[in-house]
Amino acid sequence: MRFRLLSSDPKSAMSLEAIRYRRGSLQILNQLLLPQQSLYEEIGNVRQGWEAIRAMKVRGAPAIAIVGCLSLAVELHDKRSAEESVGNLERFVLDSLNYLVSARPTAVNMARAAQELGCFVQQEAKREGATAKSLCESVINWAEAMLDKDLKDNRNIGDHGAHHLLQQVGQDKVIVLTHCNTGSLATAGYGTALGIIRSLHAVGRLEHVYCTETRPYNQGARLTAYELVYEQIPATLIADSMASVAMKEKKISAIFVGADRVVANGDTANKVGTYQLAIAAKHHGIPFYVAAPSTSCDLSLEHGGQIIIEERPSQELTDISGVRVAAPGIGVWNPAFDVTPHNLITGGIVTEVGVFAPSELQAALTRTVSKE
Protein backbone atom coordinates (compact mmCIF):
# COMPACT_ATOMS: atom_id res chain seq x y z
CA MET A 1 0.00 0.00 0.00
CA ARG A 2 1.47 3.35 -1.08
CA PHE A 3 0.48 6.14 1.18
CA ARG A 4 2.74 9.19 1.12
CA LEU A 5 4.36 11.18 -1.65
CA LEU A 6 6.92 13.77 -0.67
CA SER A 7 8.62 16.40 -2.79
CA SER A 8 11.21 15.15 -5.26
CA ASP A 9 13.54 17.94 -4.09
CA PRO A 10 15.70 16.36 -1.35
CA LYS A 11 16.22 19.69 0.41
CA SER A 12 12.50 20.16 0.95
CA ALA A 13 11.88 16.81 2.65
CA MET A 14 11.25 17.15 6.38
CA SER A 15 13.79 14.49 7.37
CA LEU A 16 15.68 11.79 5.54
CA GLU A 17 14.53 8.42 6.85
CA ALA A 18 14.58 5.03 5.15
CA ILE A 19 12.43 3.49 7.88
CA ARG A 20 9.44 4.95 9.71
CA TYR A 21 8.16 2.80 12.54
CA ARG A 22 5.73 3.04 15.39
CA ARG A 23 4.14 0.15 17.28
CA GLY A 24 1.98 -1.72 14.75
CA SER A 25 3.05 0.35 11.71
CA LEU A 26 6.08 0.13 9.42
CA GLN A 27 6.74 2.25 6.35
CA ILE A 28 9.82 2.16 4.14
CA LEU A 29 11.10 4.69 1.65
CA ASN A 30 10.96 2.98 -1.76
CA GLN A 31 14.56 3.44 -2.88
CA LEU A 32 13.81 2.22 -6.39
CA LEU A 33 12.13 5.57 -7.05
CA LEU A 34 14.84 7.87 -5.70
CA PRO A 35 15.88 10.54 -6.47
CA GLN A 36 12.86 11.46 -8.59
CA GLN A 37 10.26 10.57 -5.97
CA SER A 38 10.27 10.10 -2.21
CA LEU A 39 7.50 7.58 -1.72
CA TYR A 40 6.83 5.67 1.49
CA GLU A 41 5.14 2.27 1.35
CA GLU A 42 3.42 0.31 4.09
CA ILE A 43 4.89 -3.02 5.16
CA GLY A 44 2.18 -4.95 6.98
CA ASN A 45 3.58 -8.47 7.23
CA VAL A 46 6.59 -10.72 6.73
CA ARG A 47 5.76 -11.50 3.10
CA GLN A 48 5.74 -7.81 2.23
CA GLY A 49 8.99 -7.35 4.13
CA TRP A 50 10.60 -10.17 2.14
CA GLU A 51 9.39 -8.72 -1.14
CA ALA A 52 10.66 -5.22 -0.31
CA ILE A 53 14.10 -6.60 0.58
CA ARG A 54 14.31 -8.87 -2.46
CA ALA A 55 13.23 -6.12 -4.85
CA MET A 56 15.71 -3.71 -3.20
CA LYS A 57 13.07 -1.20 -2.23
CA VAL A 58 15.06 -1.32 0.98
CA ARG A 59 18.77 -2.23 0.90
CA GLY A 60 21.90 -1.93 2.97
CA ALA A 61 22.83 -4.73 5.35
CA PRO A 62 21.69 -3.05 8.61
CA ALA A 63 18.42 -1.80 7.08
CA ILE A 64 17.63 -5.24 5.63
CA ALA A 65 17.81 -6.82 9.09
CA ILE A 66 15.85 -4.03 10.75
CA VAL A 67 13.05 -4.06 8.18
CA GLY A 68 12.92 -7.85 8.24
CA CYS A 69 12.53 -8.02 12.00
CA LEU A 70 10.14 -5.07 12.16
CA SER A 71 7.94 -6.64 9.47
CA LEU A 72 7.63 -9.61 11.80
CA ALA A 73 6.89 -7.29 14.73
CA VAL A 74 4.09 -5.60 12.80
CA GLU A 75 2.54 -8.91 11.80
CA LEU A 76 2.75 -10.15 15.38
CA HIS A 77 1.09 -6.96 16.59
CA ASP A 78 -1.86 -7.69 14.31
CA LYS A 79 -2.05 -11.38 15.20
CA ARG A 80 -4.80 -12.55 17.52
CA SER A 81 -2.32 -14.00 19.96
CA ALA A 82 -5.04 -14.98 22.42
CA GLU A 83 -6.17 -17.60 19.88
CA GLU A 84 -2.66 -18.98 19.35
CA SER A 85 -0.77 -21.56 21.35
CA VAL A 86 2.77 -20.76 22.46
CA GLY A 87 4.10 -23.61 20.32
CA ASN A 88 2.34 -22.44 17.17
CA LEU A 89 3.50 -18.89 17.67
CA GLU A 90 7.08 -20.03 18.26
CA ARG A 91 7.01 -22.02 15.00
CA PHE A 92 5.54 -19.07 13.13
CA VAL A 93 8.36 -16.78 14.32
CA LEU A 94 11.11 -19.29 13.46
CA ASP A 95 9.64 -20.03 10.02
CA SER A 96 9.25 -16.31 9.32
CA LEU A 97 12.88 -15.62 10.23
CA ASN A 98 14.14 -18.39 7.95
CA TYR A 99 12.01 -17.00 5.14
CA LEU A 100 13.36 -13.47 5.61
CA VAL A 101 16.98 -14.69 5.48
CA SER A 102 16.34 -16.13 2.00
CA ALA A 103 15.53 -12.71 0.50
CA ARG A 104 19.20 -11.70 0.08
CA PRO A 105 21.84 -14.17 1.29
CA THR A 106 25.12 -12.20 1.18
CA ALA A 107 24.42 -9.58 3.86
CA VAL A 108 24.96 -11.32 7.20
CA ASN A 109 22.90 -8.95 9.38
CA MET A 110 19.54 -10.60 8.66
CA ALA A 111 20.94 -14.09 9.19
CA ARG A 112 22.57 -13.04 12.43
CA ALA A 113 19.41 -11.32 13.66
CA ALA A 114 17.39 -14.43 12.76
CA GLN A 115 19.74 -16.66 14.73
CA GLU A 116 19.75 -14.40 17.79
CA LEU A 117 16.03 -13.70 17.74
CA GLY A 118 15.31 -17.38 17.11
CA CYS A 119 17.28 -18.40 20.19
CA PHE A 120 15.57 -15.67 22.21
CA VAL A 121 12.10 -16.87 21.13
CA GLN A 122 12.88 -20.48 22.03
CA GLN A 123 14.04 -19.41 25.50
CA GLU A 124 11.00 -17.17 26.04
CA ALA A 125 8.63 -19.94 24.95
CA LYS A 126 10.05 -22.21 27.66
CA ARG A 127 9.70 -19.59 30.36
CA GLU A 128 7.27 -20.56 33.12
CA GLY A 129 3.93 -18.86 32.61
CA ALA A 130 4.68 -17.90 29.02
CA THR A 131 1.66 -17.11 26.87
CA ALA A 132 1.27 -16.35 23.20
CA LYS A 133 0.57 -12.73 24.11
CA SER A 134 3.70 -12.40 26.25
CA LEU A 135 5.76 -14.06 23.52
CA CYS A 136 4.46 -11.59 20.93
CA GLU A 137 5.33 -8.69 23.20
CA SER A 138 8.85 -10.01 23.80
CA VAL A 139 9.56 -10.39 20.07
CA ILE A 140 8.19 -6.93 19.28
CA ASN A 141 10.35 -5.35 22.00
CA TRP A 142 13.41 -7.20 20.70
CA ALA A 143 12.87 -5.93 17.16
CA GLU A 144 12.26 -2.36 18.33
CA ALA A 145 15.50 -2.40 20.29
CA MET A 146 17.39 -3.14 17.05
CA LEU A 147 16.28 0.18 15.63
CA ASP A 148 17.62 2.19 18.58
CA LYS A 149 20.88 0.26 18.80
CA ASP A 150 21.70 0.65 15.11
CA LEU A 151 21.41 4.43 15.25
CA LYS A 152 23.64 4.60 18.34
CA ASP A 153 26.20 2.24 16.77
CA ASN A 154 26.30 4.29 13.57
CA ARG A 155 27.08 7.50 15.43
CA ASN A 156 29.91 5.72 17.23
CA ILE A 157 31.26 4.41 13.92
CA GLY A 158 31.17 7.94 12.52
CA ASP A 159 33.11 9.37 15.45
CA HIS A 160 35.69 6.54 15.61
CA GLY A 161 36.37 6.66 11.87
CA ALA A 162 36.68 10.43 11.67
CA HIS A 163 39.01 10.59 14.69
CA HIS A 164 41.20 7.78 13.38
CA LEU A 165 41.63 9.30 9.93
CA LEU A 166 42.43 12.77 11.25
CA GLN A 167 45.05 11.29 13.57
CA GLN A 168 46.65 9.36 10.71
CA VAL A 169 46.81 12.01 7.99
CA GLY A 170 47.69 15.09 10.01
CA GLN A 171 45.79 17.36 7.62
CA ASP A 172 43.53 20.26 8.50
CA LYS A 173 40.92 19.13 5.97
CA VAL A 174 40.50 15.85 4.12
CA ILE A 175 39.15 14.71 0.76
CA VAL A 176 37.54 11.28 0.73
CA LEU A 177 36.01 8.88 -1.76
CA THR A 178 33.14 6.48 -1.07
CA HIS A 179 31.33 3.74 -2.96
CA CYS A 180 27.69 2.61 -3.06
CA ASN A 181 25.32 3.90 -0.35
CA THR A 182 26.10 3.55 3.34
CA GLY A 183 24.08 6.37 4.86
CA SER A 184 20.67 6.91 6.42
CA LEU A 185 19.08 5.08 3.50
CA ALA A 186 21.04 1.89 4.30
CA THR A 187 20.65 1.92 8.09
CA ALA A 188 18.37 3.11 10.88
CA GLY A 189 19.94 6.53 10.39
CA TYR A 190 23.25 8.43 10.11
CA GLY A 191 25.06 5.61 8.32
CA THR A 192 28.35 3.71 8.48
CA ALA A 193 30.92 4.88 5.90
CA LEU A 194 28.74 7.87 5.10
CA GLY A 195 28.35 8.38 8.85
CA ILE A 196 32.12 8.92 9.06
CA ILE A 197 31.84 11.48 6.28
CA ARG A 198 29.01 13.18 8.19
CA SER A 199 31.17 13.29 11.32
CA LEU A 200 34.10 14.82 9.41
CA HIS A 201 31.76 17.42 7.95
CA ALA A 202 30.20 18.18 11.35
CA VAL A 203 33.58 19.12 12.84
CA GLY A 204 34.57 21.21 9.82
CA ARG A 205 37.35 18.87 8.67
CA LEU A 206 35.87 17.62 5.38
CA GLU A 207 36.98 19.50 2.28
CA HIS A 208 35.21 17.34 -0.30
CA VAL A 209 33.79 13.89 -0.98
CA TYR A 210 33.71 11.99 -4.25
CA CYS A 211 31.05 9.34 -4.68
CA THR A 212 30.98 6.70 -7.40
CA GLU A 213 27.87 6.02 -9.47
CA THR A 214 27.97 2.30 -8.44
CA ARG A 215 26.77 0.56 -11.57
CA PRO A 216 24.70 -1.37 -12.44
CA TYR A 217 22.19 -0.33 -9.76
CA ASN A 218 23.48 3.22 -9.37
CA GLN A 219 23.13 3.41 -5.60
CA GLY A 220 25.87 6.05 -5.52
CA ALA A 221 24.33 8.27 -8.19
CA ARG A 222 20.75 7.83 -6.98
CA LEU A 223 21.10 7.46 -3.22
CA THR A 224 24.46 8.68 -1.89
CA ALA A 225 24.33 11.77 -4.09
CA TYR A 226 20.79 12.35 -2.80
CA GLU A 227 21.96 12.19 0.82
CA LEU A 228 24.98 14.42 0.20
CA VAL A 229 22.84 17.09 -1.46
CA TYR A 230 20.29 16.77 1.34
CA GLU A 231 23.00 17.29 4.00
CA GLN A 232 24.65 20.08 1.95
CA ILE A 233 27.98 18.26 2.08
CA PRO A 234 30.43 19.39 -0.66
CA ALA A 235 30.48 16.47 -3.08
CA THR A 236 31.08 15.37 -6.65
CA LEU A 237 29.72 12.35 -8.48
CA ILE A 238 32.13 10.35 -10.65
CA ALA A 239 31.68 7.34 -12.92
CA ASP A 240 33.00 4.05 -11.56
CA SER A 241 35.66 4.03 -14.28
CA MET A 242 37.04 7.36 -13.05
CA ALA A 243 38.03 6.16 -9.58
CA SER A 244 41.70 5.45 -10.30
CA VAL A 245 42.32 8.75 -12.06
CA ALA A 246 40.49 10.55 -9.23
CA MET A 247 42.93 8.97 -6.77
CA LYS A 248 45.81 10.18 -8.94
CA GLU A 249 44.55 13.71 -9.59
CA LYS A 250 42.23 14.77 -6.76
CA LYS A 251 44.42 14.40 -3.65
CA ILE A 252 42.20 11.77 -2.04
CA SER A 253 43.07 11.39 1.65
CA ALA A 254 41.18 8.13 2.27
CA ILE A 255 38.51 5.79 0.93
CA PHE A 256 35.57 4.71 3.10
CA VAL A 257 33.26 1.86 2.13
CA GLY A 258 30.67 -0.18 3.98
CA ALA A 259 30.31 -3.94 4.29
CA ASP A 260 27.65 -6.58 3.93
CA ARG A 261 29.79 -9.21 5.63
CA VAL A 262 33.21 -9.14 7.30
CA VAL A 263 34.67 -12.55 8.14
CA ALA A 264 37.18 -13.65 10.78
CA ASN A 265 40.37 -12.80 8.86
CA GLY A 266 39.03 -9.38 7.80
CA ASP A 267 38.06 -10.27 4.22
CA THR A 268 35.05 -8.13 3.37
CA ALA A 269 32.09 -8.57 1.03
CA ASN A 270 30.68 -5.28 -0.18
CA LYS A 271 28.97 -3.86 -3.26
CA VAL A 272 30.64 -5.01 -6.46
CA GLY A 273 33.35 -2.55 -7.43
CA THR A 274 34.80 -2.31 -3.93
CA TYR A 275 37.60 -4.77 -4.66
CA GLN A 276 38.96 -2.74 -7.57
CA LEU A 277 38.88 0.43 -5.47
CA ALA A 278 40.99 -1.30 -2.81
CA ILE A 279 43.53 -2.39 -5.42
CA ALA A 280 43.80 1.13 -6.83
CA ALA A 281 44.05 2.62 -3.34
CA LYS A 282 46.95 0.29 -2.47
CA HIS A 283 48.76 1.37 -5.65
CA HIS A 284 48.32 5.04 -4.81
CA GLY A 285 49.16 4.66 -1.11
CA ILE A 286 45.71 5.84 0.02
CA PRO A 287 44.27 4.41 3.27
CA PHE A 288 41.32 2.12 2.56
CA TYR A 289 38.74 1.79 5.37
CA VAL A 290 35.79 -0.54 5.84
CA ALA A 291 33.02 0.78 8.11
CA ALA A 292 30.68 -1.82 9.59
CA PRO A 293 28.78 -2.50 12.80
CA SER A 294 29.69 -5.68 14.64
CA THR A 295 26.39 -7.14 13.40
CA SER A 296 27.96 -7.24 9.92
CA CYS A 297 30.91 -9.27 11.19
CA ASP A 298 30.61 -13.04 10.73
CA LEU A 299 33.36 -14.70 12.75
CA SER A 300 32.00 -18.16 11.89
CA LEU A 301 33.61 -17.89 8.43
CA GLU A 302 37.39 -18.05 8.24
CA HIS A 303 37.93 -16.29 4.90
CA GLY A 304 36.11 -14.49 2.12
CA GLY A 305 36.02 -17.49 -0.20
CA GLN A 306 33.28 -18.95 2.02
CA ILE A 307 30.90 -16.03 1.49
CA ILE A 308 27.89 -16.72 -0.74
CA ILE A 309 27.75 -14.01 -3.39
CA GLU A 310 24.29 -13.06 -4.57
CA GLU A 311 23.76 -12.82 -8.32
CA ARG A 312 21.13 -10.39 -9.53
CA PRO A 313 18.82 -10.43 -12.58
CA SER A 314 20.43 -9.65 -15.94
CA GLN A 315 17.99 -6.80 -16.59
CA GLU A 316 19.73 -4.68 -13.97
CA LEU A 317 22.73 -4.54 -16.30
CA THR A 318 21.05 -4.59 -19.71
CA ASP A 319 18.21 -2.13 -18.99
CA ILE A 320 18.01 1.40 -17.58
CA SER A 321 14.60 2.43 -16.21
CA GLY A 322 13.02 -0.37 -18.20
CA VAL A 323 14.69 0.62 -21.49
CA ARG A 324 17.02 -1.92 -23.08
CA VAL A 325 20.50 -0.46 -23.69
CA ALA A 326 22.54 -3.65 -24.24
CA ALA A 327 22.67 -5.62 -27.48
CA PRO A 328 19.98 -8.35 -27.53
CA GLY A 329 21.42 -11.83 -27.11
CA ILE A 330 24.50 -10.83 -25.08
CA GLY A 331 25.26 -12.95 -22.03
CA VAL A 332 25.25 -11.27 -18.60
CA TRP A 333 27.10 -11.91 -15.35
CA ASN A 334 25.76 -9.71 -12.55
CA PRO A 335 27.22 -10.47 -9.10
CA ALA A 336 25.91 -7.94 -6.58
CA PHE A 337 29.02 -8.08 -4.38
CA ASP A 338 32.74 -8.78 -4.47
CA VAL A 339 35.20 -9.70 -1.73
CA THR A 340 38.08 -7.42 -0.78
CA PRO A 341 41.02 -9.36 0.73
CA HIS A 342 42.03 -8.24 4.20
CA ASN A 343 45.54 -7.21 3.12
CA LEU A 344 44.05 -4.42 0.99
CA ILE A 345 42.16 -2.88 3.95
CA THR A 346 45.07 -0.64 4.89
CA GLY A 347 43.24 1.99 6.96
CA GLY A 348 41.34 -0.40 9.18
CA ILE A 349 37.90 -1.78 9.94
CA VAL A 350 35.77 0.79 11.74
CA THR A 351 33.18 -0.62 14.16
CA GLU A 352 31.07 0.89 16.92
CA VAL A 353 33.69 -0.21 19.46
CA GLY A 354 36.76 1.13 17.66
CA VAL A 355 39.03 0.89 14.62
CA PHE A 356 41.01 -2.31 14.12
CA ALA A 357 43.47 -3.78 11.68
CA PRO A 358 41.88 -6.80 9.96
CA SER A 359 44.19 -9.12 11.92
CA GLU A 360 42.95 -7.59 15.20
CA LEU A 361 39.22 -7.69 14.48
CA GLN A 362 38.32 -11.16 15.69
CA ALA A 363 40.09 -10.79 19.04
CA ALA A 364 38.64 -7.30 19.57
CA LEU A 365 35.05 -8.36 18.92
CA THR A 366 35.48 -11.51 21.02
CA ARG A 367 36.66 -9.36 23.95
CA THR A 368 33.67 -7.06 23.51
CA VAL A 369 31.21 -9.96 23.54
CA SER A 370 32.83 -11.48 26.64
CA LYS A 371 32.47 -8.16 28.50
CA GLU A 372 28.77 -8.05 27.68
Image (spheres, rainbow, N blue to C red):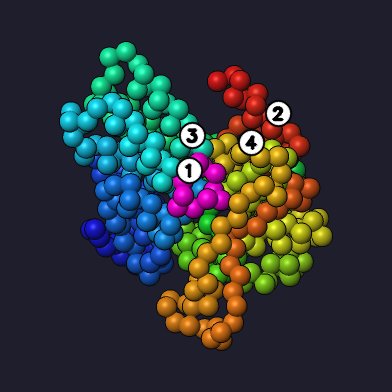
Residue farthest bottom in this picture: 327
Which residue was labeled with disc 3?
115
Q: Which amino acid does label 1 sit on?
A: Met
> Do the CB atoms of the residues marked 4 and 1 lie less than 8 Å apart?
no
CA distance for labels 4 and 2: 13 Å
**Tag 1 or tag 4, which sits nearer the N-term?**
1
**Tag 2 or tag 1, which sits nearer the N-term?**
1
Element under label 1? helix
- The percent position of residue 212, horizontal first and vertical second, equals 60, 65
Is residue 85 left or right of 111 when viewed as pictured? left
Q: Which amino acid does label 3 sit on?
A: Gln
Q: Residue 265 lies in what quarter of the image?
A: top right
Can residue 33 be found in the magenta stretch?
Answer: no
Q: Give the range drawn in magenta.
A: 101-111
Question: Image height check: is 129 above or below 176?
Answer: above
Which residue was labeled with disc 2?
363
Count residues near mark 3 (Cα–Cα under 10 Å), then give few for <14, some for 14-19, many for 20+: some
Q: Residue at x 55, y 44 (%)?
A: 108
Q: Which residue is drawn at 48% across and 34% down?
A: 115
Q: Residue 323 lies in what quarter of the image?
A: bottom left
Which residue was labeled with disc 1?
110
